[in-house]
Image (cartoon, rainbow, N blue to C red):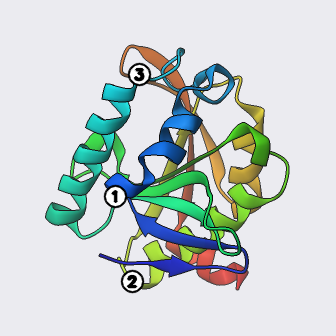
Amino acid sequence: MTVLTSSRLRYEPFADAHFDGLHAMNRDPDVMRYLLGRPETPDETRAMIARVRTRWAEWGYSWWALLDRDSGEVVGAGGIQHLRLDRAAPHEIGWRLRREHWGKGYATEAAVTMADHAFAVLDAPRLCAIRHPDNTASQRVMERLGMRYVGLEPCDGMEVALHVLPRAAWLARA
């Protein structure tokens, strides 16, 4: 399983050791407002870690715990998977942070590192990202990446905003 680093973060594939930090994030109603719409239970966090570990075994990529390189604290999570978890679908990039780490640039730092990995190592032809239409913080990160807003589309019973970043656009920005 792939471990990545950036200037302030270490990206470790989800493991049981990350439970406390991941659950602290996922039980926060403000963090989960645009995701589940409610805090996650401890059992849901454990099940999520197990699902992600299965994807790492099957695909060779999935979600990382984002750790502060100095303290080792879990500051968030980020990942590359497939849209709607369908391996035939485009690669999807995603992230979330513990509330106390919002506004520090960690989401953009993680998104850039994961996009580099998706295009250079996974050979993704494009990356997609979805967000709740009201989630302007994620929209700003998507814009910083150079993602283009495509429109609203249905996903799991709700409408989400879809953003796309073609490989050529990513390579042209470097």
The residue sitting at the right extreme is: 103
Identified by mark 2, the residue type is Val
Q: CA distance from mark 3 to mark 1?
A: 17 Å
* Residue 77 at x, y percent in the picture: 53, 52
Residue that mark 2 sits on: 121
Residue that mark 1 sits on: 15
The residue sitting at the left extreme is: 58
Label 2: element kind: loop
Residue that mark 3 sits on: 41
Mark 2: few/some/many CA within 10 Å (<14, 14-19, 20+):
few
Identified by mark 3, the residue type is Thr
**In the image, is 49 to the left or to the right of 64?**
left
Please identify the quarter of the rendering in which residue 161 is found.
Answer: top right
* Residue 3 at x, y percent in the picture: 43, 78
67 vs 132, nearest the viewer: 67
* Residue 154 at x, y percent in the picture: 42, 22
**In the image, is 11 to the left or to the right of 67?**
left
Q: CA distance from mark 2 to mark 1?
A: 22 Å
